[in-house]
């Protein structure tokens, strides 16, 4: 946005250097002006950036009960009072309260055999968000940032990673993949709107660019250059017409109604709009799943928001032809105890829980794995956190064994171990 | 008689003086030696060191480094006019005596410890930790004493700040071992948790023998109803009582079953059992009478002697069989040449942690002084001898190792006197040089000139307050209301909620190398667009800018004053030209000056130390 904005293309972080690009292109085309540098770059970027795939994670913070969501046990006392409903998949029932989701199950692969060892919120949340268990001395990049790092289009005005509610940071992957946190979906996020007219903002940025000269010449060349890239990115966002994606003014009322008048519903609608604008990773968070007491009523309340929003998201993506290149994951950090406690609650239970995935070429209308009749263990086809994340990588066409190098020089795979759950794709 | 008295007096003075000399070299001596070593090295590499920074640059630099503030325009003017040859040394001493010194460095170490916390609930204890540390720095307690307190702490987390490090990792031996070694010795051993270190000499045994100093640290809530009632205790506080005894059925029923009916009710239960009564009941109450019988309790008793679960000994996990007990491991310090106590088998927690503290802080352990010196030097000069600053150790190579050794030896000989170290570094010509165009990646150029560095969140916050404030917090209001729960917590703990919110936005782990500190988009958006900042730079009565424009009709004078306020320097001729052109092009003085002030606050220079 400074005077020299147009010949700066922040692509080096995406792994493409200007020099290697020039080497790989015919110099003649550039010299004769057939292809501007910018056009050439866009071409190359498109090849590398896999045509705008996106990942949406619907995050149920607290650990949703599998019994009151997608793995009810009506015939066992552990199932509690929860009743079941029929879904679009013949013979497959889920818990009542999820009627809208039941209708879109043809698009969904339901995993009832998730299993893990971490029963502490922070540790399990960290693990599900990074593919690694926490360790004080290394901050692992968030999985969403790591995926975006592989597929994001560096030319996009909008941030590559957006989270509606807090999430895991990008760690050493840096600024370009740091989640942009939105607290009030449906309106422009704070400080994105300029307090002055665009013309004045441009004037200010121009003056700033001129005044940076002194410090640069005194020996802060590197700092000034980094700062300029950051301000380019920020001002690109501020002045971009693309920010209209955040503002629902142009979204028909009936579409908004379909997602539901709730924070989570608006979050899901924003997720769809951001997918349309090329954002690579979007997380939408739903709070309040830590049901140590009053499990049944609490989940009914939560489901009344998450059920319509999740189903609307899948259907809307499908109708717009976006589901093929968008993966939607619904999960929390763990499941809940089969035994109902004396306060009508269920406690933490990582041994068995459930998640679902839709889109991105995953075969919907199927259930993968099962829990035992009493829900205390995985009956068959256990799926671990690394298995799940590796499978998502496959659906995103990202190599889960790709190694990023930590600042201490330690190679770190996107996902630590795990096998792709092949059933998801067959 | 009087002669004798005065003689004794002089002898005393002599003796004291001799003692001071004996105690360690002075800051001035070591600063001279450091400069000589660095100049020699630069000369050999045929590099010309930069000249000393001017008073403006020195003053802004030293104020930010030692007290976390920027100088006021008045202070800058007076300092420039002061003809005294020793004014820089005097300024260093003056700043070291301020409240700001203790505050900014307490906040720094709070970030070092807490931004790596593996226990997220630890956040509530940050304020207590920071307050405790501030008192230590204000009293200038020695670094080995502070370290000893942090490693051996017991007490109530919400009151005794020295429990902060232990609590940040919930007393977990492996996490603590990794952090203690990283923070106090600059040695990264956590790789050796799971496998022998790939590039270093550390074996798995080394790491787990270090963790074996810590299995008897216990972190628990003293009142199960109160989520902030955490305490750090030693399991040997009550002799003969191990962690497992909490769940010894005979003892539990002897103490808790007051009506002796052989059944434990919720009212009778105490301590950790009361805390988890419903949970335990749900699991074991076979006859569903809402009480726990001795037999039911026995059935639910956790298995003894598993790492972290009811054991007072340390077991190194068996990687081939993670669910097994692992190998009983005794504490041994991993650096062979370091002298320290030998522990008896089954040593108590106090013995173990005191022994660990002795090894870590021992004068026979050079890494203790080196790690602190490397960190503070890097913070003040923009890069350390070892980089990253917390990845040192016998297998790494330092740049200008001799300089680090000279400083570390002086620091140790002065009994780890922290202010001595700050004073020494600040007195060197190396610290006081001006910025140069030296290539920081070129090892030959290192320390030939000052390196601009990015300010920490507290420093930026302090600077913004100083510039816009006049005492009032211009960043309060809606900004501070970002996360209500967190802000309420900050208020209760006596912290400035706007500063906490600012820290959330601008904070970073202070162990991060400078080249990785790139800022982020929300930070830029805040500086560019936040209503608070934009209101505070409006050219209207009551703001600093409004005041400047009222007092100076002449644009050049107003620009001088504005630059002095924001950047602690005069504008260059070129900058005057650019700005005056901007003012005349725009034809609206107030609006033009708002834009200029906006540009200065959004400049690289403003968020940098130069």
Image (cartoon, coloured by chain):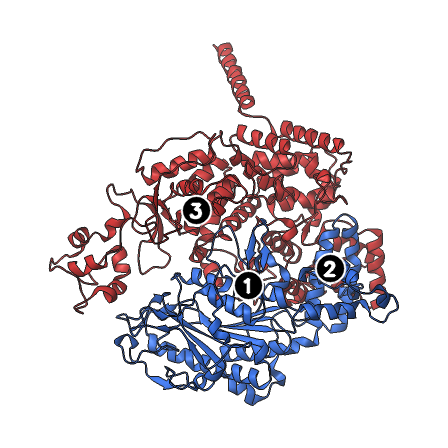
Chain colours: A blue, B red
Relative vertical location of residue B333 with respect to residue B271 in this rendering, above or below: above
Residue that appears at 63% across and 85% down = A250
Q: Choose between B391 and B318: the one closer to the eye.
A: B318
What is the total number of numbered labels drawn onto the structure image?
A: 3
Select label 1 or label 2 by which is in front. Answer: 1
Q: Callout 2 environment at 10 Å: few (<14), some (14 to 19), or many (20+)?
A: some
Number of residues whose C-alpha sits closer than 10 Å to that of mark 3, classed few (under 14), some (14–19) or many (20 or more): many
- The residue labelled by disc 2 is A17
Q: Is residue A54 left or right of residue A310?
A: right
User: Where A317 sits versus B586, above or below?
Assistant: below
Residue at 78%, 71% in the rendered image: A39
Q: Which of the two residues, B281 or A87, is positioned nearer the viewer here?
A: A87
Characterize the local packing of mark 1: few (<14), some (14-19) or many (20 or more) Cα atoms within 10 angstroms.
Answer: many
Residue at mark 1? A400
From the viewer's side, name the closer residue of B45 and B470. B45
Tag 3 residue = B176
Q: Is A76 left, or right, of A311 in this rendering? A: left
How far across and how far down the image is residue B404, in percent? Answer: 61, 34
Percent across and percent down for residue B284 are: 22, 64
Q: CA distance from mark 3 to mark 2?
A: 41 Å
Label ID, residue B503: none
Q: Is residue A38 left or right of residue A415?
A: right
| Residues at discs 1 and 2 in contact (Cβ within 8 Å) | no
Residues at discs 1 and 2 both on one chain: yes
Q: Residue at x 77, y 65 (%)?
A: A5
Residues at marks 1 and 3, CA–CA distance in whole angstroms: 31 Å
Q: Quadrant of residue A84 in the image?
A: bottom left
Label 2 SS: loop
The lab-note entry on whether marks 3 and 2 share a chain reads: no
SS class, disc 1? loop
């Amino acid at each position: 946005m400074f005077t020299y904005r147009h010949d700066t293309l922040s692509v080096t972080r995406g792994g493409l250097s200007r020099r290697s690009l020039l080497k790989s292109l015919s110099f003649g085309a550039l010299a004769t002006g057939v292809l501007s540098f910018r056009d050439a770059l866009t071409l190359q970027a498109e090849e590398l950036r896999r045509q705008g795939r996106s990942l949406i994670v619907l995050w149920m913070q607290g650990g949703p009960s599998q019994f009151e969501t997608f793995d009810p046990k009506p015939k066992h006392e552990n199932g509690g009072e929860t009743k079941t409903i029929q879904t679009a998949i013949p013979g497959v029932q889920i818990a009542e309260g999820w009627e809208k989701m039941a209708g879109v199950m043809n698009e969904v692969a339901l995993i009832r055999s998730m299993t893990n060892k971490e029963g502490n919120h922070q540790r399990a949340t960290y693990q599900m968000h990074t593919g690694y268990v926490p360790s004080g001395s290394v901050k692992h990049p968030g999985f969403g940032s790591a995926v975006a790092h592989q597929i994001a289009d560096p030319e996009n005005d909008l941030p590559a990673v957006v989270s509606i509610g807090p999430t895991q940071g990008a760690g050493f992957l840096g600024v370009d993949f740091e989640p942009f946190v939105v607290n009030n979906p449906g309106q422009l996020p704070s400080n994105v709107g300029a307090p002055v007219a665009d013309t004045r903002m441009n004037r200010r940025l121009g003056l700033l660019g001129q005044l940076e000269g002194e410090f640069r010449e005194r020996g802060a060349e590197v700092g000034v250059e980094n700062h300029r890239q950051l301000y380019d990115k920020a001002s690109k966002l501020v002045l971009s017409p693309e920010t209209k994606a955040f503002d629902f003014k142009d979204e028909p009322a009936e579409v908004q109604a379909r997602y539901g008048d709730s924070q989570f519903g608006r979050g899901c609608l924003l997720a769809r709009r951001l997918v349309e604008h090329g954002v690579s990773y979007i997380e939408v968070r739903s709070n309040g799943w830590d049901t140590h007491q009053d499990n049944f009523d609490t989940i009914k309340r939560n489901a009344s928001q998450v059920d319509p929003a999740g189903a609307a998201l899948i259907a809307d993506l499908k109708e717009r032809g976006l589901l093929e290149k968008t993966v939607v994951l619904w999960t929390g950090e763990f499941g809940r105890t089969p035994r109902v406690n004396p306060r009508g609650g269920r406690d933490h239970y990582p041994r068995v829980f459930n998640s679902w995935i839709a889109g991105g070429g995953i075969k919907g209308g199927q259930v993968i794995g099962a829990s035992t009749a009493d829900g205390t263990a995985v009956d068959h086809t256990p799926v671990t956190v690394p298995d799940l994340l590796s499978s998502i990588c496959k659906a995103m066409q990202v190599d889960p064994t790709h190694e990023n190098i930590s600042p201490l020089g330690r190679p770190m795979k996107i996902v630590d171990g795990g096998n792709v759950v092949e059933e998801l794709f067959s | 008689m009087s002669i004798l008295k005065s003689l004794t007096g002089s002898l005393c003075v002599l003796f004291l003086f001799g003692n001071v000399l004996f105690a360690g070299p002075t800051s001035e001596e070591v600063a001279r030696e450091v400069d000589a070593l660095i100049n020699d090295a630069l000369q050999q590499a045929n590099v010309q060191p930069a000249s000393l920074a001017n008073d403006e640059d020195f003053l802004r630099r030293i104020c930010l480094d030692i007290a976390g503030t920027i100088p006021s325009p008045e202070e800058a003017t007076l300092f420039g006019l002061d003809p005294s040859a020793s004014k820089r040394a005097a300024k260093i001493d003056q700043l070291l005596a301020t409240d700001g010194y203790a505050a900014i460095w307490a906040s720094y170490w709070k970030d070092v410890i807490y931004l790596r916390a593996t226990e997220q609930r630890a956040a509530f204890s940050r304020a207590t930790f920071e307050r405790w540390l501030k008192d230590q720095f204000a009293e200038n307690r020695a670094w080995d004493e502070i370290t000893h307190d942090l490693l051996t702490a017991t007490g109530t987390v919400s009151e005794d700040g020295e429990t902060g490090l232990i609590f940040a990792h919930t007393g977990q031996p492996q996490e603590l071992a990794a952090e203690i070694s990283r923070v106090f010795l600059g040695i990264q051993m956590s790789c050796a948790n799971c496998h022998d270190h790939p590039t270093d000499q550390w074996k798995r045994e080394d790491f787990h023998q270090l963790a074996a100093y810590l299995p008897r640290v216990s972190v628990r809530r003293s009142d199960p109803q109160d989520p902030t009632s955490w305490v750090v205790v030693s399991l040997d506080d009550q002799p003969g009582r191990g962690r497992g005894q909490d769940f010894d059925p005979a003892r539990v029923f002897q103490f808790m079953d007051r009506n002796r009916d052989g059944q434990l009710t919720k009212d009778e239960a105490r301590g950790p059992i009361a805390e988890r009564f419903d949970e335990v009941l749900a699991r074991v109450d076979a006859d569903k009478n809402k009480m726990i019988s001795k037999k039911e309790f026995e059935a639910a008793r956790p298995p003894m002697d598993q790492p972290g679960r009811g054991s007072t000994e340390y077991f190194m996990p068996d990687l081939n069989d993670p669910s097994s007990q692992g190998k009983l491991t005794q504490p041994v310090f991993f650096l062979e040449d370091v002298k320290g106590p030998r522990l008896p088998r089954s040593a108590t927690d106090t013995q173990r942690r005191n022994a660990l503290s002795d090894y870590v802080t021992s004068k026979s352990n050079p890494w203790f002084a080196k790690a602190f010196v490397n960190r503070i030097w890097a913070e003040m000069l923009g890069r350390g001898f070892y980089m990253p600053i917390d990845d040192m150790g016998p297998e790494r190579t330092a740049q200008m190792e001799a300089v680090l050794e000279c400083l570390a030896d002086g620091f140790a000989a002065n009994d780890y006197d922290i202010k001595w170290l700050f004073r020494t570094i600040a007195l060197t010509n190396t610290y006081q040089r001006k910025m140069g165009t030296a290539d920081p990646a070129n090892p030959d150029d290192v320390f030939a000139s000052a390196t601009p560095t990015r300010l920490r969140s507290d420093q930026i916050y302090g600077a913004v307050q100083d510039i816009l404030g006049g005492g009032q917090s211009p960043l309060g209001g809606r900004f501070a209301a970002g996360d209500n729960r967190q802000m309420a917590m900050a208020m209760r703990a006596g912290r400035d909620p706007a500063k906490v919110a600012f820290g959330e936005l601008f904070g970073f782990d202070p162990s991060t190398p400078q080249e990785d500190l790139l800022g982020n988009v929300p930070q830029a958006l805040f500086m560019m667009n936040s209503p608070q900042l934009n209101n505070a730079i409006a050219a209207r009565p009551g703001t600093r800018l409004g005041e400047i424009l009222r007092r100076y009709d002449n644009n050049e004078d107003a620009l001088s004053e504005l630059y002095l306020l924001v950047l602690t320097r005069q504008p260059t001729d070129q900058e005057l030209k650019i700005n005056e052109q901007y003012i005349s092009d725009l034809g609206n003085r107030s609006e033009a000056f708002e834009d200029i002030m906006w540009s200065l606050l959004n400049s690289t220079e403003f968020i940098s130390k130069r």
